[in-house]
Every structure is written in structure tokens, then in C-alpha cells.
Image: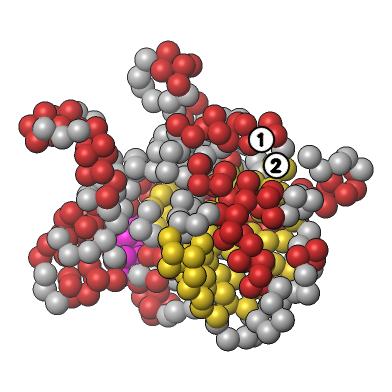
Amino acid sequence: MKVLVINAGSSSLKYQLYEMLNETVLASGRVERIGMDSSIVTHEPTGKPEVRDVSEILDHVTAVKRVIDMITHKEHGVIGSMTEIDAVGHRVVHGGEVFKGSVLVTQEVKLEIRRLFDLAPLHNPAHMMGITAVEAVMPEVPQVVVFDTAFHQTMPQTSYLYPIPTVLYRRHKIRRYGFHGTSHAYVSDKAARFLNKPLESLKMVTCHIGNGASCAAILDGKSFDTSMGMTPLEGLMMGTRSGDIDPAIVPFVMNKEELTLNEANSMLNKHSGMLAISGISSDMREVTEAMHDGDKNAKLAFDMYTYRLRKYIGAYAAAMNGIDVLLFTAGVGENAPDVREAVCEGITFLGIKLDKEKNRLRSKEAREISTPDSRVKVLVVPTNEELLIARDTNSIVKGLSHSNHPVQ
């Protein structure tokens, strides 16, 4: 089976084409600047040179057509025709309380995703554009949606409810949902396989840290708690997001600075975090480099970032009454040894012993960076959300063919 994985944004579309027999990537790429006359298509066929094309792409339907043109092209394509694509899998950020797992796209599913637009106004509408574009170009091909929030639907009420009037939960579903669930699910399973232990037997804290960042407490193989909340703003200090702050700061600053609601929202999501404290960048590489060059603000940003990360790891170890595995993943987690060292050196009371030489080594494979006598296994596991989406899509569509139910 060949599965096309799509992650649609409001003006972009990323894709990967998988051959599921051995889970190999046949091609990947992205369409940027959708809606403009200078849209860019970057196509990377495995084993062939990269192809870039600039042209007018005004909507997502045209973007999907261009993707199909690329992967079926005589010279730089990887399949003979569109009919070889057996299914399409989509990333959808918010599944609310309705979706506890990946599902086949039906009219009812599309309607529910639309109902969730209010909870993810920057993401779900764009994902829906991707779904409807595929419907227009490949109407007979089954589609599956994989939700960022689904993995965290196992959280108990003590984790997901906020201590505010419960009428707000009943009316508006204000609660913790958590995000990066596809990544947390993938790396926790990968870690258990790497350690050759049942996932259900491990108390694990997974740290998905990139420009956006979240921690998850994984107990009995399920999400028990996670740092992002109703939106991706809560939790850790991030590249441009504040993470946890006193909520009273928001009305106070709005009043003092005469900010609108949109301006306050922009301040917390786009002008805070490492960018705000360092005054240099939201990119950990640039902040770390400036820190080593003696920049005091960069050092402060780095120290705040790692301090707040340590607090969450400690809190989740307490919440689970122990920790067996500490895992780092995503852009910063996989590629910033200084961050991993600063975090681990500050929580040695948990029984963590870091092997500094192993920590400095670079690899694209899962690896252990703790010493043999470390009570807690510290791992670096590269995430692969697209592969998990492809696997879920493959499983659901194969299940359809075995059950004789028509694809809706």
C-alpha cells in the first residue's frame, strides 16, 4: 500500500509518500506561499535530485494537483500514476473530546472538525482545506485524519480539568487538551522497543522541544498529563511563546499598555519566550552560540528555558510516583546537547546520570545518553510524526478492505 501524508497549513502544504510494505519514503516535499503568484514547490524524490519550481498556486486544490504532478512526473516522479496512491493521511491539530484516535474521513467527521474551528482557528480550517482539496483531486481515495490531541484523551479529570467554574467546561469545553500527541505517542513506543521493555511497564517523561515545546507524563503506556493546555500556549517556555504565566498579567498589561485582545494574544504567542528574554532570536542554536560568546541575555534565556523544563520533569516524576525513562525529541531535543546536559545536571536527585560523551554524539537513530548505572534511562529519540500518520492511515484503510464496508 502507498500512503500520501499531508500536513496542510493556511499557505503551505507538506507531503510525504510512503510505501508501507517496508515503511520507506518514496518522496517528500512542500508547497509554500499558496495564494500567491510566486508559489514555491520543492520536491525531493528518494534517490533523485531535488526539484524546485516557482509558479502561481492560488488554492489548495491546485497545490494538491501540483504534488500529484511531481510524484507522477516521468523524470522526477516515483510512481506511474495517481491510481497507485491507496490512501491519504492528514495531520489535524485539534480533535477536541470527540476523537480519541485516528478516523476515516466521513461527512460526520468533517462536520465535527469544523465545529472545532473555534478551539484551533489557526490550524483546523487549514487542515480542512487540505482534506477538501484531496477530495476534489482524488475523490475515490480514502482519507484518514490523525489528531494531535487524540493521544492525550486518556488523561484523568485531575489532569485535564481547570479549577474554574465547571459551567465553562460544560458550555465551552474549556479544558486541557494537549498537543504534539502524535510525536509523544511515536517516541514513547519507539523508546520501549529500544529498551526491549513493554511500554505499559514504564514511567516515562517525553520532552518534545522545538520552537513549540511540550512535556508528557506517560504512565502505563498512556498519556497521564501534558504541559500544553486548551491551546499550545500553556506550559514550557518556547521560542516565541511565554508558556506558564500568572493569568492576571494579561488584563493588567492590556490595561496599562492599552492593548487589544488580538495584540495581547500576539504578544504571548509571537513576541515572548526565548525571543523576548534573549533579545536575539527564538532559535536555540543562535541563543546558545550567543551565550557561549558571553551574551548575558542569551545566557538568561537559556537558563530560564532549561530551568522551566526541569520543573516539569520533576513535577511529572512526582505525579507518577517515579520515573524510569526521560526522553528528548524534536528539533531542540534531538540537536541541542547543551540543553540536555543543563536539564539532566539539575535533576540528579531523580537518579539521572548523564554520559557527557554520548550526549555530544550526533545520530539519526534512537540512542541512550545516560551512564550504565543511571537509575533513569535518558534517551534521544528522533520523532517521526509522518510515519505514525502513515501507519494509522494504512491500518484503518486495510481494515476497511477486510470488513467489506464501503469508504464514505
* Residue at horizontal 88 percent and vertical 40 percent from the top: 405
Magenta residue span: 338-348
Q: Does residue 382 show up?
A: no
Against 391, residue 143 (above or below) is above
Vertical relation: 382 (above or below) 267: below
Quadrant of the snapshot with the N terminus: bottom right
The type of residue carrying mark 1 is Val
Residue closest to the far left: 256
Mark 1 to mark 2 CA distance (whole Å):
6 Å
Residue at point 74%, 69% (across, down): 19
| Colouring scheme, one of rainbow, by chain, secondary structure, one colour | secondary structure
Residues under numbered marks 1 and 2 in contact, where contact means CB atoms less than 8 Å apart: yes
Q: Is residue 332 above or below residue 115?
A: below
Q: Quadrant of residue 391?
A: bottom right
* 1 up-or-down from 215: above or below: below
In terms of secondary structure, where does tag 2 sit?
Answer: loop
Label 1: how many Cα within 10 Å (few below 14, some 14–19, many 20+): some
Which residue corresponds to mark 2?
A: 105
The disc label shown at residue 259, or none: none
**Image coords of residue 91 (percent x, y):** 57, 51
Q: Position of residue 325 (x, y in %)?
A: 50, 56
By secondary structure, the bulk of the magenta-drawn segment is best described as: helix
Quadrant where the image shows the C terminus: top right
Q: Which residue is mark 1?
A: 109
| In-image side of 71 versus 238 (left or right) | right
Q: Amino acid at mark 2?
A: Val
- Tell whether position 345 is magenta: yes
Check disc 1 and report its element: helix, strand or loop: helix
The picture quadrant where one finds residue 279 is bottom left
Residue sitting nearer the eye, 393 or 7: 7
Within-10-Å neighbours for mark 2: few <14, some 14–19, many 20+: some
Whether residue 200 appears in magenta in the rendering, the answer is no
